[in-house]
Structures are given as structure tokens and as C-alpha cells.
């Protein structure tokens, strides 16, 4: 079945450094979504990408969807301590739900 | 308005007992999902409801797991004869848009129920 893989599993950065997490699907996706889960919290929707090659920005966050619609990335510029958490990508499965990657846990040291 | 709510927030139960977990989706959201998240893992899909019917139950791990939804709103996930491997955080999510097969929309998650089976 369709699988979504994320790398790296963990990333520890100094505040102010950049951060990137990558997501790869075994199949072409109709769309891809990104969620953030703070420690002890629940996943919160960040964004959805639909078009091949799409790039969207939210302040310091830049999201990309690959040309083949099988991969995506999230890049954070100049990380802050508020960016701490686990970032998940998710693609639709063959049914009606989402397949989530295992996430990238980001730790930011002041 | 209110977000997705779940109860209880924590549940400790003995192996072999049955448990019921409740989810109140956002008002007006017809799509409802149950996921579970084991420690340090991603989210594992369990079941999807459209209104009161469940067109996708493919993620339920065994026949000990069942779920229902009434009035197109509240949903209950029941685990019978709990086992230690059932320990996890059970997350409910709802979505305003009705998904198509292979095309899910943004989902709003509740705070989860942390289930511990001793």
C-alpha cells in the first residue's frame, strides 16, 4: 500500500539556524498536507499543497510539492524556540483518510 | 466556535477490560476520523465516518475494536478485552469537507485520549 516516509527523524538546531524536513511517497498524491504537533499536544493543520511544483509560504515556513507529486518539503528559516515540535506530512490513502509520515521532531536550543 | 473534544483525556484500565472513548466533532463537520498514535510514532488510521455510516473501517486492528456514530455527531470507539499493545493516544479528527476516495481534506484534531492498559 501507499507509504509516506519522512527524513530526518530528529533534528536539533541552534536558534536562528534553518531547518528542512523531507517527505516521500511511494505513489503519486492528489495532494499533500503538513501538520505540526507541539510536545504534549495534538496535530494542527498547517497547509495543503495540490499542484505539481507548488510552493507556498507562511512567514518563515516554505512548503514545496514536487513536480511528480511524490515528494514534498518544509523549510523553516531562522528557527525560533516556538518552532519546537514534530512536523508530519500526510497524503491521502486509497480510501478517505490520510497516511501520515512518522514525523520529524525539531528541537531548537536558544 | 468549539474545537473537537474528546473524553476522557486519560484512561487507565486493566488488561481484559472494555473501554469506551468519546469524540465530539466540530459542529457541522460530517466527516469524522479515528487515529491512534503510539509513543514516538506517526498516526495510524483506524476508521472513517461519513455521517453515521463508516465506509472505511480498514484500519481497525482487530475485531476487538468497534466504533459508532450517532446523530451525525458524537462518536464512540470501543475496545473490548483490552491488551497491553492497545496502549496509545487515540485521536479523533473531523473535517468540514466530504472527502473523495484518494482525496482527503484538512482535518481538525481533538486533544486525544491517552489509554494505558496495565
Image: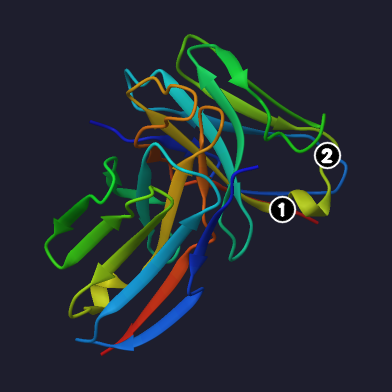
Say which of B10 and B71 sits in front. B71
Does residue B48 lie above or below B83 as drawn? above
Q: Which residue is mark 2?
A: B17
Residue B25 position in % (x across, y down): 41, 27
Task: Tell whether B49 sits left or right of B31.
Answer: right
SS under mark 1 = loop
Tally of numbered discs: 2
Does residue A38 lie above or below A48 as drawn? below
Does residue A2 lie above or below B84 as drawn? above
The structure residue drawn at horizontal position 20% and vertical position 64%, both measured from the top left corner, is A61
| Residue farthest toward the left in the current orientation of the protein | A59
Task: Tell whether A40 sits left or right of A80.
Answer: right
The structure residue drawn at horizontal position 56% and vertical position 35%, both measured from the top left corner, is B34
Of tags 2 and 1, the one toward the viewer is 1
Quick check: do tags 2 and 1 share a chain? yes
Task: Give the crowd class for mark 1: few <14, some 14-19, many >=20 residues within 10 Å.
Answer: many
Q: Is residue A104 visible?
A: yes
* Whether label 2 touches label 1, CB < 8 Å: no
Residue A37 position in % (x across, y down): 40, 59
Q: Chain of mark 2?
A: B
Residue A64 position in % (x across, y down): 27, 57
The structure residue drawn at horizontal position 32% and vertical position 24%, both measured from the top left corner, is B96
Residue A55 position in % (x across, y down): 20, 54
**For residue B24, which numbered disc appears in the image?**
none
SS under mark 2 = loop
- Tell me which corner region of the image, top left, top right, bottom left or bottom right, holds residue B42: bottom right
Does residue A10 lie above or below A91 as drawn? below
Say which of B51 and B26 sits in front. B51
> Which mark sits nearer the N-terminus, 2 or 1?
2
Say which of A62 and B50 sits in front. A62
Q: Which residue is mark 1?
A: B87
Q: Is residue A42 visible?
A: no
Amino acid at each position: 500500500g501507499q507509504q509516506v516516509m519522512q527524513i530526518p527523524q530528529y533534528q536539533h538546531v541552534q536558534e536562528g539556524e534553518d531547518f528542512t524536513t523531507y517527505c516521500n511517497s511511494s505513489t503519486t498524491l492528489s495532494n499533500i498536507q503538513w501538520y505540526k504537533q507541539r510536545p504534549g499536544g495534538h496535530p494542527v493543520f498547517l497547509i495543503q499543497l495540490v499542484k505539481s511544483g507548488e510552493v507556498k509560504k507562511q512567514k518563515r515556513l516554505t512548503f514545496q510539492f514536487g513536480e511528480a507529486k511524490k515528494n514534498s518539503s518544509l523549510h523553516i528559516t531562522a528557527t525560533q524556540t516556538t518552532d519546537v515540535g514534530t512536523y508530519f506530512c500526510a497524503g491521502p490513502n486509497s480510501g478517505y483518510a490520510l497516511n501520515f509520515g512518522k514525523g520529524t521532531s525539531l528541537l531548537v536550543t536558544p | 466556535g468549539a474545537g473537537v473534544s474528546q473524553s476522557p483525556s486519560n484512561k487507565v484500565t486493566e488488561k481484559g477490560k472494555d473501554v469506551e472513548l468519546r469524540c465530539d466533532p466540530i459542529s457541522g463537520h460530517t466527516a469524522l476520523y479515528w487515529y491512534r498514535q503510539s509513543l514516538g510514532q506517526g498516526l495510524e488510521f483506524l476508521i472513517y465516518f461519513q455521517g453515521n455510516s463508516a465506509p472505511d473501517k480498514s484500519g481497525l486492528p482487530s475485531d476487538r475494536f468497534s466504533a459508532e456514530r450517532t446523530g451525525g455527531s458524537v462518536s464512540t470507539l470501543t475496545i473490548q478485552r483490552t491488551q497491553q499493545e492497545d496502549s496509545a493516544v487515540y485521536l479523533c479528527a473531523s473535517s468540514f469537507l466530504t472527502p473523495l476516495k484518494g482525496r482527503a481534506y484538512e482535518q481538525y484534531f481533538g486533544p486525544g485520549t491517552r489509554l494505558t492498559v496495565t
